[in-house]
């Protein structure tokens, strides 16, 4: 029984979680997301200080699912080469196949979607679902820069997905 690790790659506001929700049931996949894990290990999903603990928990959940032959849909930015390498290593441990789904809308679309997120700040950690614009732009640049090298990282399949309504949402 061989598992499958599907990793989303995209900046905040790219539509990763929406895509994951839409496809997970049809794929029979377990969604493992860092926002959900931040909520488990801290006061809320916006607590960026909880990210190291969330990553540990998420990787362990994915490891166990892959070892059992399940399909895991990793819902996170996966923007950095070292983060993607850790996912590829995790899949290799269990002999799982890998797929990268790149969601990279135009930067104005990512900014518009991110701006539509709640500005509510958690009373305990001060975090908010809205990511600073400079962070969105930096991650977008980093992913764009790394796209040509993505096939050389070792993914079995790479799919570029342009979310629907990018023109409409960019104007919003």
Image (cartoon, rainbow, N blue to C red):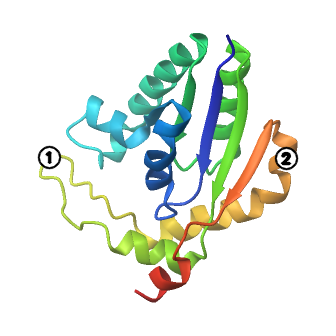
Q: Quadrant of the N terminus?
A: top right
Q: Quadrant of the C terminus?
A: bottom left
Horizontally, residue 52 falls left or right of residue 27, namely left
Q: Nearer the viewer, residue 93 or 2?
A: 2
Q: Is residue 69 above or below residue 160?
A: above
Quadrant of the rendered image containing residue 82:
top right
Give the Cα separation between the discs numbered 1 and 2.
Answer: 41 Å
In the image, residue 15 lies at what x, y percent? Answer: 49, 60
Q: Nearer the viewer, residue 26 or 159?
A: 26
Closer to us: mark 1 or mark 2? 2
Horizontally, residue 54 falls left or right of residue 84, namely left
Residue at screen point 36% across, 74% down: 115
In the image, residue 111 lies at what x, y percent? Answer: 46, 75
Residue at screen point 58% across, 26% down: 71
**What is the number of the mark on residue 124?**
1
**What is the number of the mark on residue 151?**
2
Q: Residue furthest left?
A: 123
Horizontally, residue 122 falls left or right of residue 138, namely left
Q: Residues within 10 Å of mark 1 (few under 14, many from 20)?
A: few
SS class, disc 2: helix
Residue at screen point 80% across, 35% down: 156
SS class, disc 1: loop
């Amino acid at each position: 029984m061989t598992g499958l690790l599907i990793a989303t790659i995209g900046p905040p506001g790219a539509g990763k979680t929406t895509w994951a929700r839409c496809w997970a049931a049809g794929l029979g996949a377990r969604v493992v997301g860092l926002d959900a894990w931040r909520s488990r290990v801290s006061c809320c999903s916006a607590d960026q200080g909880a990210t190291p603990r969330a990553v540990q928990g998420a990787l362990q959940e994915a490891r166990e699912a892959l070892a059992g032959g399940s399909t895991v849909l990793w819902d996170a930015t996966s923007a950095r080469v070292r983060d993607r390498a850790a996912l590829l290593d995790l899949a290799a441990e269990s002999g799982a196949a890998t797929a990268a789904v790149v969601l990279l809308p135009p930067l104005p679309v990512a900014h518009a979607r991110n701006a539509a997120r709640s500005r509510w700040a958690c009373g305990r950690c001060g975090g908010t679902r809205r990511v600073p614009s400079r962070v969105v732009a930096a991650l977008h640049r980093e992913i764009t820069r790394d796209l040509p090298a993505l096939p050389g990282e070792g993914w079995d399949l790479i799919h570029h997905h342009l979310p629907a309504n990018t023109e409409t949402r960019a104007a919003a």
